[in-house]
Amino acid sequence: MKSNTARILLECNFRCPFCFAAWHDDKEKPIEGPGRNLPPGKDWFRLITRMRERGYERVAISGGEPTMHPDFLRLVKRAHELGFKSIELQTNGSLLTEDNTRRIAAAGVTDALVSLHSHREPIFDRITVTEGVFSTVVEGIRHLIASGINVMISHVNVQWNTADLVDFVRFCHRMFPGMREILFFSMQPEARGAKNMHLWPPLPEVREHLKPALDECVRLGIGFRMDSQVGYPMCFVGGHEHRVDLGDVTVPNETFGEDLSSFRVIERKKVKLPQCADCFFEPACYGFWEDYFTLFGTDGIVPVERTERLAGLFPHLEGEWRGERHAELVRVRKKGQKTVLDPETVESLPLPWKEGRKVARDRAEG
């Protein structure tokens, strides 16, 4: 469905060190009142009405933590009245009491994407910079499922939780029967994430633990998704390529609509490596975060060989290998900017820590 996001505020009661939406951290005096920490005059009732008039069928109400917004329930009700087929709540789950969840379902929320970055309470507390909230989030997810809302779990991989991926899958299977799927994400070098890039897990470690976690999802019958934009490249999914939707990258207009600004912001921060030229998925991949390579080197990127299975699953990419030209990836970098690191640059990586941090920070700022 054609979708759009209403990021109704930036405030959040968690302090996750990789949050890509924490742009307000740099404000000296946060804006107070309804719609706080968004530009004054942001009329979300008018804006979601305009989204519907433009043909959007799905709206994601996000933040920060959107349930903190004083008009949250009224906005959901308005979206329901406008006829959105899907109204998704993106939340950290901290305010999902049984009564609140009942109100959320009655207002019209159909789907929920709940952040849960560890099943171990000490790690959860460390990631969210909270104490005593873990059980509330777990019970909140269970309340959503009991209310008939389609629940997806958002899990961002960082150094503190990557080795636990298989056990995390088993925990979700045990605790959340009836959930729809788990979404596995990589950390983005934006906002607070740009200041804490040392939390990236090494890609070889991701490769070691991610595929077994995906295998476990299949074994247990759990749905899962690897976002082709802010997840990992296809060379990390090891036999699960058919479960990754490349549409967000290859035809972004179908997901993001006419405004591709947020899409470009993300994809322009990625590069490919020289060996990526030999990958079957090269025509449908922007690579991985350039700042990661700057700080940690290029180990872990392994081109995917063409097979008859992949050729059958992705006939449009098979056509590329035969010399048939299809629609190219959307241009996300300015003319003259590199999209592939040259061998000499690769040889110099990773940079010394302080120099690498400065390079990464300068790129993030400009």
Image (cartoon, grey):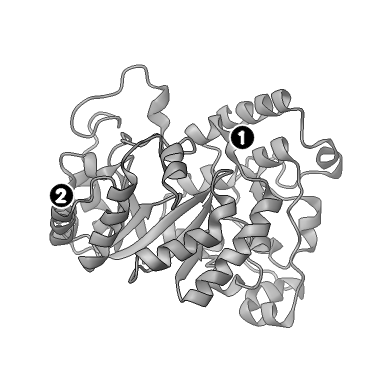
- Indicate the amino acid at tag 2: Leu
Q: Which mark is residue 73?
A: 2
Classify mark 2: helix, strand or loop: helix
Label located before the other in sequence (1 or 2): 2
Instruction: Tell me the residue that label 1 is attached to.
Output: 198
Provide residue 88's location: percent of width, then percent of height.
Answer: 29, 58
Give coordinates of residue 199: x percent, y percent: 58, 38
Q: In front here: 266 or 41?
A: 266
Q: Quadrant of the C terminus?
A: top right
Nearer the observer, 108 or 255: 108
Q: Residue at x 65, y 82 (%)?
A: 312
Q: Hey, which quadrant is residue 38 in on the image?
A: top left
Q: Residue at x 45, y 49 (%)?
A: 120
User: In the rendered structure, which amino acid carries the disc numbered 1?
Assistant: His
Q: Nearer the viewer, residue 184 or 159?
A: 159
* Count of residue discs: 2
Q: Which is closer to the viewer, label 1 or label 2?
A: 1
Q: Dot 2, crowdedness within 10 Å: few (<14), some or many (≥20)?
A: many
Q: Is residue 3 left or right of residue 83?
A: right
For this view, does 333 lie left or right of residue 44? right
Q: Spatial distance from mark 1 to mark 2, Cα to Cα?
A: 38 Å
Residue 140 in picture, x, y percent from top left: 26, 54
Residue drawn at point x = 42 percent, y = 31 percent: 23
